[in-house]
Image (tube, rainbow, N blue to C red):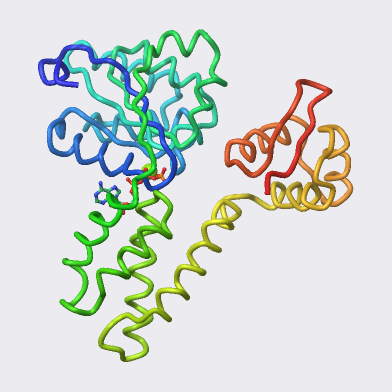
């Protein structure tokens, strides 16, 4: 990424890896410390449409827009800035974007891109036109090893816990239970500490630890469900009962359960999102497509 400091082009980068492997943390840390003035960070879960993302990029780059401009105009403004100043655009959770044409547009504009996702197959679904214009260099973030998690958690415990209030062997248990995911590991310890506090204990005991490990594992499984809308939930319920259905049958069934069902096209978008979330699997193409529940 160094050439960016001299206003030269950089390679576009794709950071991929499962949840809690430090992708967001490391990307933000590097941008903040080395490229603060010339970078922008956008979370595509929060800003999904091309218009929203472009507006965020421009505002973060201190380019005044009011947001009511048509998308085409925002694109032009972004393309114009590249002559004076190339920026690095980091798109986190890039698989949540409504439409991937935005990537083509950004790649063509000459700004540098850092894309982040937990789903490596998000790229496989891009058209060749977009993929080749991006020419991404992939960097994989593997799950943390247990001893790496141990170091990460112990570091944090030193800041957050009173000395002697959490045994090292409990940190070891938490790093095992977290299964490579630093967010889960830290969450286990944080919650166990809270529980001990509420119970007026001087230190965390096995009881708090066990309880939180169970809770966190349960939470992890239901986590993506929060992000589904009522239509997606209805569809998921049907699949949960039937296990596997053709796309057409599933859609019909869904239409009978909802008062105001969405049109076929929106339905397909919803399905794509649920496949991306890893909740359901798709097989086959077009009218032969079938959906199957994952868990
Ligand atoms: N190497 C590390 N050192 C210290 N803390 C870390 C490290 N890696 C991750 N963490 C912590 O773990 C948590 C999760 O990390 P982060 O948000 O970067 O994961 P992620 O790979 O972006 O996950 P997701 O794909 O779910 O967004 C954060 O609280 C972060 O501070
Ligand atoms: Mg992240």
Judged left or right of residue 118, residue 253 is: right
Q: Nearer the viewer, residue 148 or 192?
A: 148
* Quadrant of residue 25 within the rendered picture: top left
- Which residue of the protein is positioned furthest toward the bottom in this rendering? 200
Q: Nearer the viewer, residue 188 or 164?
A: 164
Q: Nearer the viewer, residue 147 or 74?
A: 147
The mark total stands at 0
Judged left or right of residue 254, residue 60 is: left
Quadrant of the rendering where the N terminus is positioned: top left
**Residue at image coords 78%, 32%:** 264
* Quadrant of residue 80 within the rendered picture: top left
Judged left or right of residue 49, residue 188 is: left
Whole-percent x and y of residue 196?
Answer: 34, 83
Whole-percent x and y of residue 200?
Answer: 31, 91
Whole-percent x and y of residue 41?
Answer: 30, 36
Q: Nearer the viewer, residue 92 or 68?
A: 92
* Quadrant of residue 18 within the rendered picture: top left
Judged left or right of residue 11, residue 103 is: right
* Vertical arrangement, residue 274 with respect to residue 129, above or below: below
* Vertical arrangement, residue 79 with respect to residue 166, above or below: above
**Residue at image coords 39%, 14%:** 134
Whole-percent x and y of residue 129?
Answer: 50, 8
**Residue at image coords 25%, 40%:** 26
């Amino acid at each position: 990424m160094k050439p960016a400091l001299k206003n030269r082009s950089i390679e576009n980068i794709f950071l991929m890896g499962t949840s809690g492997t430090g992708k967001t943390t490391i990307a933000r840390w590097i941008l903040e410390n080395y490229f603060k003035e010339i970078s922008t960070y956008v979370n595509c879960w929060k800003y999904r449409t091309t218009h929203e993302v472009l507006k965020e990029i421009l505002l973060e780059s201190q380019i005044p827009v009011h947001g009511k401009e048509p998308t085409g105009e925002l694109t032009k403004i972004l393309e114009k800035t590249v002559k004076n100043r190339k920026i690095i655009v980091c798109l986190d959770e890039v698989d949540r974007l409504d439409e991937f044409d935005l990537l083509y547009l950004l790649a063509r504009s000459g700004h540098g891109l850092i894309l982040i996702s937990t789903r490596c197959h998000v790229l496989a679904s891009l058209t060749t036109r977009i993929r080749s214009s991006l020419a991404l260099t992939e960097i994989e973030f593997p799950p943390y090893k247990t001893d790496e998690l141990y170091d990460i958690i112990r570091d944090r415990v030193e800041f957050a816990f009173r000395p002697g209030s959490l045994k090292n062997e409990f940190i070891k248990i938490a790093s095992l239970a977290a299964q490579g995911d630093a967010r889960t590991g830290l969450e286990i310890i944080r919650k166990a500490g809270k529980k001990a506090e509420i119970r007026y204990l001087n230190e965390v005991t096995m009881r708090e630890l066990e309880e939180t490990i169970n809770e966190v594992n349960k939470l992890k499984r239901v986590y993506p469900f929060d992000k589904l809308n009522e239509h997606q939930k209805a569809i998921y319920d049907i699949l949960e009962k039937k296990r596997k259905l053709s796309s057409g049958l599933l859609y019909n069934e869904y239409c009978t359960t909802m008062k105001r069902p969405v049109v076929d096209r929106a339905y397909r978008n919803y399905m794509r999102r649920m496949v991306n979330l890893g909740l359901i699997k798709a097989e086959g193409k077009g009218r032969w497509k079938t959906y199957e529940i994952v868990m």
